Amino acid sequence: MKGLNKRGQIATLQTLVIALLIIGIVLGIGFLLLEEFVGVIDDKAGTFTNATYETVSDNGVYSEYNSTNALIPCFNTFALSICINATEGTEISSGNYTTTAATGKLAYSGIAGGGYNTTDWNCTGTYLYGGAGCAGVESTIEGVEEIPQWLTIIVIIFIVGILLAIVFKVLPRVTGGRTSGGSGGVVAEI
């Protein structure tokens, strides 16, 4: 059996490593661009009037309009314009509550035991969201965020694969399939 050129075998491995490196760089840049793209397509305006928040406390409750409960894609910029105590019908000043713009969470922040803690509220406000395309981009970004958990294992498997390829493909052909030392024996070529 005619042996292959060892430079050609090493060059094949080198080409494979460079190709995988280029693919990784292109994918990384692509995912960064996707994340920036979300900021462009999440600007549809939504409003709600007299949305009921049940048992608002200092632990906070989520709006039915947020990404956690209603699965609205790319939910952001949640803001309340007015809140009314559902039982008494009185307006609740903004000093008695806090909101989280990214999630639509409303929490009581007034005086402990004040008249509005653990009561139902009716609130009016606005938020921004994205369309169906934004949901696809968000799910892709969430999927990619899991890659770092597996990256170490992937790199180790890749390195072991290269070492095994060198041991089983390159070294037997470089030595011509012969063993050194000892007397006689059977030589196997792969």
Image: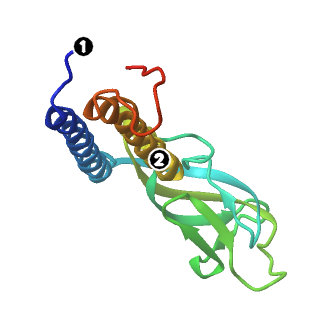
Percent x, y of residue 157 = 48, 42
Q: Earlier in the sequence, mark 2 or mark 1?
A: 1
Percent x, y of residue 126 = 45, 56
Identity of the residue furthest to the right in this view: 113
Colour logic: rainbow
Label placed on residue 1: 1
Question: Can residue 141 be seen?
Answer: no
Q: Which residue is mark 2?
A: 147
- The answer to which of 179 and 150 lies nearer the viewer is 179
11 relative to 68, above or below: above
At x 18%, y 37%, the residue is 15
Q: Are marks 2 and 1 in contact (CB under 8 Å)?
A: no
- The answer to which of 49 and 163 lies nearer the viewer is 163
> Left or right of 112: which side holds 178?
left
Circle 2 or circle 1, nearest the eye: 1
Assign a secondary structure to mark 1: loop
The C terminus sits in image quarter: top left
At x 28%, y 45%, the residue is 24
The N terminus sits in image quarter: top left
The residues bearing labels 2 and 1 have C-alpha atoms spaced at a distance of 44 Å
